[in-house]
Image (cartoon, helix red, strand yellow):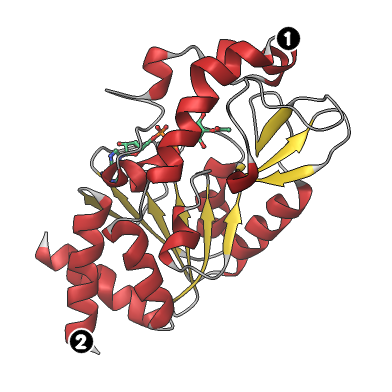
């Protein structure tokens, strides 16, 4: 394990144009459950019944009551962990440029990352389905479910539901970041949802070194990843940073 950490530290020092792709796993140590695997959200809720845009349009009250209200309350309380903080430290060391995240929890920004591409949107903003007015999280009143705009329309968090398009801007920026990086750190994602899961492939095909951090292997492991560090994001990031700082 230590020689693996040493190799990754060496590569990070070499590639000062690193990009991170993160998934739900990086926020597990902040108390936010992942989607898949043991204890995952999709074990309890059928995503087609609660996370598909058609389900939301058909019955927003049900989706708000069963999934969104609890999620908003959980995310409002959550604080960044050593995984998020480690990426900020990498940015301050002049190694990491951009974080592409599939997460909607805003924890990279809370930790202090300055360039975050929110691939699947964010729970920090809500948009009225009728008039498109935007409202920030702090101003959302959840005493009545579903929350409604002054025009009577229902508010939907600006997250990408199944059946919805990824914003073209986020997609183009992510592809550009993946094509231009020298190293991609893939942290805490099962890499099962496209097109986000394709970013490491683009990075690899463009000549980047791909480093994966995850307690479990994924389809990227052994196919796309040059290095696989098995473990929890916070612990692994702390070890990498200790090694980097020893070498600097
Ligand atoms: P998943 O829930 O699919 O995968 C979470 C990954 O994190 C798994 O590979 C776990 O092994 C790993 N993991 C668990 N604990 C960890 C820890 N402490 N440190 C590091 N890794 C850990 O989450 P995503 O890959 O993010 O989409 O899922 C992708 C998308 O699927 C989500 O953005 C969401 C979901 O449907 C939308 O909401 C559109």
Q: Secondary structure at mark 2?
A: helix
Which of the image's four quarters has the C terminus? Answer: bottom left
The extreme left residue here reads 2
| The one of 134 and 224 positioned closer to us in this rendering | 134
Tell which quarter ligand 1 is in: top left
**Could you tell me residue 106's position as x and y percent?**
50, 52
Residue tagged 2: 247
Residue at (58, 54) in percent of width and height: 202
Q: Is residue 188 visible?
A: no
| The one of 43 and 105 positioned closer to us in this rendering | 105
Q: Secondary structure at mark 1?
A: helix
Quadrant hosting residue 92: bottom left
Quadrant hosting residue 133: top right
Residue at (31, 41) in percent of width and height: 28
Residue tagged 1: 58
Of pointers 1 and 2, the one earlier in the residue sequence: 1
71 above or below 23? above
Q: Is residue 61 left or right of residue 77?
A: right
Number of marks drawn: 2
| The one of 77 and 240 positioned closer to us in this rendering | 77
Residue at (36, 59) in percent of width and height: 84
Q: Is disc 2's CB within 8 Å of ligand 1?
A: no
Number of the front mark, 1 or 2: 1
174 above or below 160? below
Which of the image's four quarters has the N terminus? Answer: bottom left
**Could you tell me residue 88's position as x and y percent?**
40, 70
Q: Is residue 218 left or right of residue 155?
A: left
**Could you tell me residue 49's position as x and y percent?**
58, 10
């Amino acid at each position: 394990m230590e020689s693996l950490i040493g190799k990754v530290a060496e590569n990070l020092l070499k590639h000062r144009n690193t990009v991170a792709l993160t998934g739900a796993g990086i926020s597990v140590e902040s108390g936010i459950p992942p989607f898949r695997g043991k204890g995952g959200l999709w074990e309890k809720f059928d995503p087609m019944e609660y996370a598909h845009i058609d389900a939301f349009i058909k019955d927003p009250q049900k989706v708000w009551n069963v999934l969104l209200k609890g999620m908003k309350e959980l995310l409002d309380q959550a604080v960044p962990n050593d995984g998020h903080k480690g990426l900020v430290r990498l940015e301050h060391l002049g190694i990491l440029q951009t974080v592409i995240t599939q997460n909607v929890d805003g924890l990279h920004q809370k930790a202090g990352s300055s360039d975050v591409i929110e691939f699947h949107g964010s729970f920090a903003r809500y948009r009225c389905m009728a008039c498109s007015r935007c409202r920030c999280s702090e101003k959302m009143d959840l005493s009545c479910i579903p929350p409604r705009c002054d025009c009577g329309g229902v508010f939907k968090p600006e997250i990408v539901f199944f059946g919805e398009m990824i914003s073209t801007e986020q997609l183009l920026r992510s592809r550009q970041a993946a094509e231009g990086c020298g190293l991609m750190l893939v942290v805490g994602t099962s890499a099962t949802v496209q097109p986000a899961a394709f970013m490491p492939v683009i990075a690899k095909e463009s000549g980047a070194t791909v480093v994966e951090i995850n307690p479990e292997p994924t389809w990227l492991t052994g196919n796309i990843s040059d290095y696989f560090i098995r473990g929890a994001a916070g612990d692994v990031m702390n070890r990498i940073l200790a090694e980097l700082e020893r070498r600097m």
